[in-house]
Amino acid sequence: MLVKVTEHNKPQPKPVAELRDGIVAAIRKDRGSEAAMRAAQDGQAKLQAGTAFDDVARQLGVSSEPARFVARTDSTLPPQLRELVFNSAKPTGAKPVYRAVALQTGGAAVVAVTGLRTEAPPAEKDKLADQLKQQNMQARQDAARHGQADAEAYVAEMRRTADVRKNPKAFE
């Protein structure tokens, strides 16, 4: 490939008229996100005071999702919401933990952590895991034993069939 520069223009700032719409949109988004975060924090305070979640959502003019289990790998929630949920304090008793968070896409959210669910492995799983470990260990031992026997048989066969000549001068 051959490249030839035929013209060179010095860098110049873009005219404000071209950038105006983008600047206005960015300012509006920032101000909207700040207002949404203030509203979410007010909603969090109302929830902590005892107002029902649906009532707070109605007052803010937003929709709310019903309570559901959220796994660490749940891809239906934005990553910062998942992180917030799993870094929240554990709810005590029947009172949920309420948290407000600003979203990277703009806006904000209020989350209620109502419970924590962990999976305790059943005794049956533990027994099966122990059996599999024992089977794997036995298989490795058998493979090592057979491999060693095969190697010894190979060496014995090589000694039996090989024509070896020793050079006594090499050992001087």
Image: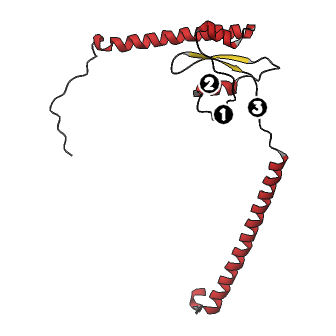
Q: Secondary structure at mark 1?
A: loop
In this figure, what is the number of numbered marks? 3
Q: Position of residue 139 (x, y in %)?
A: 74, 66
Q: Are marks 1 and 2 in contact (CB under 8 Å)?
A: no
Query: What amino acid is found at the position of numbered circle 1 in the picture?
Result: Arg
Which residue is label 1 attached to? 72
Quick one: quadrant of the C terminus? bottom right
Give the residue displayed 25% in from the left and 22% down from the top: 11
> Between marks 2 and 3, how big is the CA–CA gap?
17 Å
Query: What amino acid is found at the position of numbered circle 3 in the picture?
Result: Arg
Q: Position of residue 150 (x, y in %)?
A: 68, 79
Query: What amino acid is found at the position of numbered circle 2 in the picture?
Result: Leu
Which residue is label 3 attached to? 117
Q: Secondary structure at mark 2?
A: helix
Counting residues from the N terminus, which is met first, the one under dot 2 or under dot 3?
A: 2
Q: Is residue 91 visible?
A: yes
Which residue is label 2 attached to? 81
Q: Residue furthest left?
A: 6
Counting residues from the N terminus, which is met first, the one under dot 3 or under dot 1?
A: 1
